Image: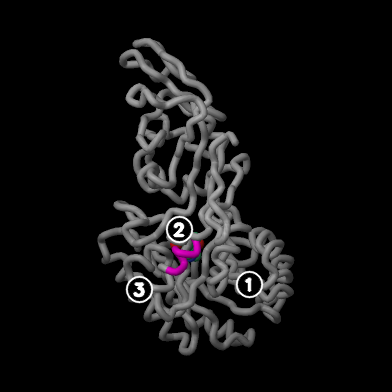
Amino acid sequence: MRVAATIDSVALAHNLGIVRQRVAGSHVYAVVKADAYGHGLENTVAALAGADAFAVACMDEVLELRAIDSRSNILVLEGVFDGRELAVAKADKLEIVVHSDWQLQLLERDGVEGIRRVWVKFDTGMHRLGFAPESAGDVRARLAALGIEAPGVMSHLACADEPVLADTARQMAVFGAVCKLFPGSPASLANSAGVLLHPDSYLDWVRPGLMLYGVSPLPEGNGTDFGLRPAMTLSAHLLSIQEVTMGNAVGYGATWQAPRDCRIGIVSIGYGDGYPWCATAAGEVLVRGKRVPLAGRVSMDMLGVDLTALPAAHVGDEVILWGAGLPVEAVARAVGTSPYELMCRVSRRVPRRIAGQVGMSPIKVSA
Ligand SMILES: *Cc1c(COP(=O)(O)O)cnc(C)c1O
């Protein structure tokens, strides 16, 4: 197989267990938007069946999820976009977020019968989505007029992954004041960073995504610091090896020249598979347990690596882009992006292979 993302379902289940340990009595939405952060929805949902409910971004993702799971409760984090989507949400008994006046008007026009729960979202300082805290009384009254006496109340943390706590403390204070206006309502605030660093943010429902995949959102360290296990290993193979004499160039634009006589390996993955083009300058991959640097620009289907320090490498060897032995957090830092983006960008061309199923030996990815 040219390239594969091997997904460790035991790791996914283990990571959910870590969430549960940390949040004790809080309920857990497992966030599986963006095809389960690139891990493949179907296998991920099966591995995370122990969650209390799933959360996705939009109605298209609800339909994908429903095709494989007809029973679980689902929260739609961006809510519905129009009356047609609201009708589907009612028929399917979904939980929906209402973050804006236009959405509230839609509910007032069409009603909410069938909706399992409305979560009203407030902007407590991120300035992305949500009603202003000052409008809480008005929003509460409009929801009550719709027959919704105790809507869920939620917000989102902007800086929970940062070592400076002031921004998060300010957001939590604002959120606490809003929640007081909704007695009896369930409250939800924490994403992964909240679960990892801010026990005060757990409340009734937590909404972790990234950490379920074994990855840390923090600027330093990685998921294993918290006992998490990375669920995805992205791997490819050495297609060819050649000697390139000093001064000769490798790849498009001839941007990389051999600083000495080099042994160059060509790896069967490129930006068409979602491996970032911007890794060209600083990327490293793992071959035979050793990190080696990229050589030349990442192409659509291939990339070059400098194997000079690894004479044992030969054609057919597995190459790990991230995962076991090379944390995706480290790759993201080296190339100047986030692990969220790296994982979400793994393209449809990359087969997701499930490994670690109970009672089944892991699938070997080598050719
Ligand atoms: C994506 C998302 C989450 C999950 O965030 P992570 O950082 O991946 O844990 C939680 N809540 C909302 C509203 C989101 O959009």
Image quadrant in which the N terminus is located = top right
Q: Position of residue 243 (x, y in %)?
A: 42, 14
Q: Which residues are magenta?
A: 11-17
* Cα distance in 3D space between marks 2 and 1: 20 Å
Report the amino acid beneath label 3. Met
Q: Are the residues flagged by discs 3 and 1 in contact, CB closer than 8 Å? A: no
Local packing at callout 3 (Cα closer than 10 Å; few below 14, some 14-19, many 20+) is: many
Q: Which labelled disc corresponds to residue 72?
A: 1
Q: Which labelled disc corresponds to residue 210?
A: 2
Q: Secondary structure at mark 1?
A: loop
Tell me if residue 135 can be seen. no
Residue 295, placed above or below residue 120 = above
**What secondary structure characterizes most of the magenta part?**
helix
Residue ID for mark 3: 172
Residue 220, placed above or below residue 169 = above
Report the amino acid beneath label 1. Ser
> What residue is at 53 percent from the left and 75 percent from the top?
120
Image quadrant in which the C terminus is located = top right
Q: Nearer the viewer, residue 27 or 59?
A: 27
Residue 1, placed above or below residue 9 = above
Residue 329, placed above or below residue 367 = below
Q: Position of residue 278 (x, y in %)?
A: 43, 34
Q: Is residue 131 left or right of residue 217?
A: right
Q: Which labelled disc corresponds to residue 259?
A: none
Q: Secondary structure at mark 3?
A: helix
Local packing at callout 2 (Cα closer than 10 Å; few below 14, some 14-19, many 20+) is: many
In primary-sequence order, the first of circles 3 and 1 is: 1
Q: Is residue 341 left or right of residue 106?
A: left
Q: Position of residue 11 (x, y in %)?
A: 47, 59
